[in-house]
């Protein structure tokens, strides 16, 4: 499972030994920082029991140890704009 923006994860010791106490984590993004195979860096917010963000963190975790509690919203389709037309020029009168 690769986390997506908006996912709420339960991060436990299974994800990394640094999480002796489990925490809830809302993902902002998966960082493209160097990591070992099967590990990844996540940027997001630690959540309290009511789901409010209490601190922003970047965490280093094993992908296999993450548990998704709530999926983020579906990504919106990407729209590609066509080439822009040049602006119409108005003639300038001289004199």
Image (spheres, helix red, strand yellow):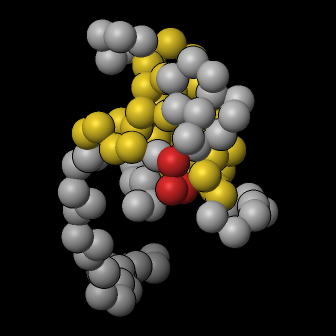
> Is 22 placed above or below 16 here?
above
Nearest the eye: 2 or 62: 62
Residue 6 visible in the picture: no
Query: Residue at the location (69% across, 34% down)?
Result: 17
- The residue lying at 75 percent from left, 64 percent from top is 36
Quadrant position of the N terminus in the picture:
bottom left
Q: Is residue 91 toward the left or the right of residue 17 in the image?
A: left
49 left or right of 71 in image: right
From what the image shows, is residue 90 above or below residue 56? below
Q: Where is residue 48 in the image (x, y as percent from the top left)?
A: 42, 12
State the image coordinates of residue 74 (x, y, percent, origin top left): 21, 57
Residue pictured at 65% horizontal, 40% vertical: 16
Quadrant into which the C terminus falls: bottom left
Q: Where is residue 29 in the image (x, y as percent from the top left)?
A: 51, 49
Q: Quadrant of residue 40?
A: bottom right
The residue nearer to you, when weighing 47 against 83, is: 47
Q: Nearer the viewer, residue 6 or 8?
A: 8
Residue 47 located left or right of residue 35:
left
Name the foreground residue: 73 vs 70.
Answer: 70
Question: Would you identify the image quadrant in which residue 67 lies?
Answer: top left
Q: Looking at the image, is 34 positioned above or below residue 30?
A: below
Mark count? 0
Horizontal side of 82 relative to 35 (left or right) equals left
Q: Which residue is drawn at 29% across and 72% down?
A: 78
Q: Using the image, determine if residue 83 lies above or below residue 57.
A: below
């Amino acid at each position: 499972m690769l986390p997506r923006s908006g996912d709420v994860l339960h991060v436990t010791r299974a994800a990394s030994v640094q999480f002796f106490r489990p925490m809830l984590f809302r993902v902002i993004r998966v960082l493209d920082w160097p990591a070992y195979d099967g590990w990844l860096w996540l940027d997001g917010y630690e959540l309290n029991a009511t789901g409010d963000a209490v601190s922003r963190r970047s965490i280093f975790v094993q992908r296999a140890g993450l548990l998704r509690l709530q999926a983020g919203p579906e990504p919106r389709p990407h729209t590609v704009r066509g080439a822009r037309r040049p602006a119409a020029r108005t003639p300038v009168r001289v004199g």
